Image (cartoon, grey):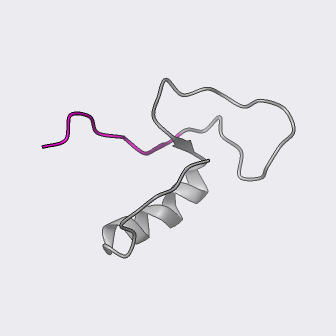
């Protein structure tokens, strides 16, 4: 059994495009822009996404 789950969520403070300055800081879980989350959500719901690498 896993001891910790990672929650992937959207946050309206995360922009769609890459920026040079810092954006909002989540408290541990990856935060995506709303538009990108909707894309990823489709893959997760269809079970086409089994791994997510975050850099």
Residue 1 relative to residue 34: left or right: left
Q: How many marks?
A: 0
Residue 27 forms part of the magenta stretch: no
What is the span of residues highlighted in magenta in the rendered image? 1-10
Most prominent secondary structure in the magenta stretch?
Answer: loop
**Which quarter of the figure has residue 24?**
top right
| Up/down of 14 relative to 46, above or below | above
Q: Residue at x 60, y 39 (%)?
A: 12
Q: Position of residue 7 (x, y in %)?
A: 37, 41
**Which quarter of the figure has residue 20?**
top right
Residue 25 relative to residue 6: left or right: right
Of the pair 47 and 41, the residue shown nearer to us? 47
Quarter holding the N terminus?
top left
Residue 4 relative to residue 27: left or right: left
Q: Position of residue 9 (x, y in %)?
A: 45, 43
In the displayed orientation, state which residue is furthest to the right. 20
Residue 2 forms part of the magenta stretch: yes
Q: Position of residue 44 (x, y in %)?
A: 36, 65
Q: Residue at x 66, y 40 (%)?
A: 14
| Up/down of 14 relative to 24, above or below | below
**Which quarter of the figure has residue 22?**
top right
Of the pair 26 and 53, the residue shown nearer to us? 53
Q: Position of residue 35 (x, y in %)?
A: 59, 57
Q: Residue at x 71, y 45 (%)?
A: 15
């Amino acid at each position: 059994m896993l001891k910790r789950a990672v929650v992937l969520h959207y946050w309206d403070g995360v922009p769609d495009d890459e920026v040079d300055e810092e954006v909002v800081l989540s408290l541990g879980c990856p935060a995506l822009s709303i538009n990108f989350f909707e894309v990823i959500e489709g893959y997760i719901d269809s079970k086409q996404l089994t791994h997510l690498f975050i850099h």
